[in-house]
Image (cartoon, helix red, strand yellow):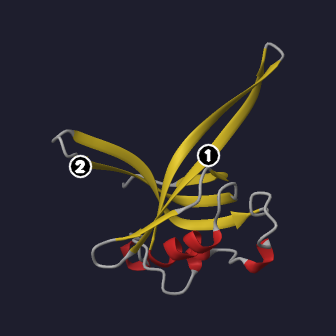
Amino acid sequence: MSGINKVILVGRLGKDPEMRHTQNGTSVCQLNVATSENWVKDGQKQERTEWHRIVCWSKLAEICNEYLKKGRQVYVEGRIQTRAWDDKEGNKRYTTEIVASTVQFLGTSGGRSDASSDDLPVDPGAAEGDTQDTAQDDDIPF
């Protein structure tokens, strides 16, 4: 039996999305999303924030780059992926990121009044022409 690699996050963008394009012209957008947990210890409120690197591809990348801004709350579904490369000095480097399959925009645009959530796509991951690497129905063994 195969394993399951699925991530679901709800958090806020720590900065504006960063868009770039691969050599063949495919759009790639990186999001930095913060999630926080709160608890009380000895009567004192405690908080821990985790930062997550999210990568969006193709049409999803373009939509996220166009509509998302720092502070915006998002719901992200995807998978964890670790990449390795050699830096300029020949050192092996690693990064772990979440490859998004779905991004939904939540709440308001980070306290800004420049866009209404009614103007934004509800599920950019389901946008037409989305060419994410996702399992096809034919790939499912049951």
Neighbor class of circle 2 (other Cα within 10 Å; few <14, some 14-19, many 20+) is few
| Residue projecting furthest to the left | 90
Neighbor class of circle 1 (other Cα within 10 Å; few <14, some 14-19, many 20+) is many
Does the rendering let one see residue 107?
A: yes
The kind of residue tagged 1 is Ala
Tell me the quadrant of the picture where the C terminus can be found: bottom left
For residue 121, above or below residue 52: below
Q: Position of residue 14 (x, y in %)?
A: 61, 50
The kind of residue tagged 2 is Trp
Tell me the quadrant of the picture where the N terminus can be found: bottom left
N-term mark: 1 or 2: 1
For residue 96, above or below residue 49: below
* Kind of element beneath mark 2: strand
Q: Position of residue 109 (x, y in %)?
A: 75, 63
Circle 1 residue: 34
Does the rendering let one see residue 4?
A: no
For residue 116, above or below residue 52: below
- Identified at 32% across, 71% down, the residue is 22
- Judged left or right of residue 9, residue 28 is left
- Identified at 43% across, 79% down, the residue is 131
Q: Check residue 85 in the rendering and tell me which mark sits there, or answer none.
A: 2
